[in-house]
Amino acid sequence: MNTVLALYKAFAFIVTLVSVAGIIFVGFRSVDLRRRYQEKKMRAEVLPDNEQVVTEQALTALQDATTRRWRAVVERLGTEDQKDFKTAIIEADGLVDAALRAYEFPGESMGERMQAVTRERLPSINDLWQAHKVRNAIAHDPHYSVSPREGHDIMRIYKKILEELGIL
């Protein structure tokens, strides 16, 4: 009987220690999460209209990469082939999405990130919505056709957006 009682006490002591350690861990973790949340909230209040901070080095790297990829996209347009226009539009849309992510606009998809953009930050946001709708039509409908004129117009919109974001 004494052995069973001793085992029970030892087991209860171990469970108590693990529980106390768990409570302490959760307490420290919640303090850390609360601090991170407050920092993020303060950053959002300090930076109006979701204009997030992008370091100069990161911005330069993004500009260089985007410029190289943009040149490759524009080269596709020289053929006047509809397939090349479709590919160029999809790639240009991807470049804009990468820029929006770099500026840390919130959202899981490009559409959600575009909803977070204000007209003050990106004056041509409505044009971007139109271009993005064409991109979605291309991506979801294999029979969607893009005329050379429409393709060039859409590409001008993407170029204007990248310039407004300071990427091109």
Image (cartoon, rainbow, N blue to C red):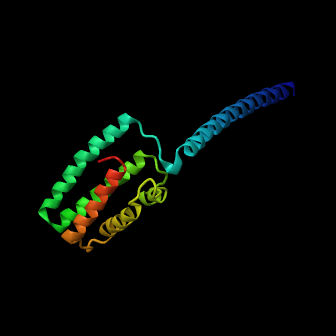
Residue 80 position by quadrant = bottom left
Residue 154 position by quadrant = bottom left
- Name the foreground residue: 23 vs 64: 64
Identify the residue at image location x=41%, y=36%.
55
Residue 142: x %, y % from top left: 27, 71
Q: Residue furthest right?
A: 1
Identify the residue at image location x=24%, y=73%.
145
Identify the residue at image location x=32%, y=38%.
60
145 in relation to 24, above or below:
below
Point out the image quarter for the N terminus.
top right
Residue 140 position by quadrant = bottom left
Residue 136: x %, y % from top left: 35, 66
Q: Is residue 146 left or right of residue 129?
A: left
Identify the residue at image location x=32%, y=46%.
167
117 in relation to 29, above or below:
below
97 in relation to 26, above or below:
below
- Name the foreground residue: 95 vs 60: 60
Residue 34: x %, y % from top left: 65, 39
Q: Is residue 44 left or right of residue 28?
A: left
Q: How many marks?
A: 0
Q: Is residue 160 left or right of residue 104?
A: left
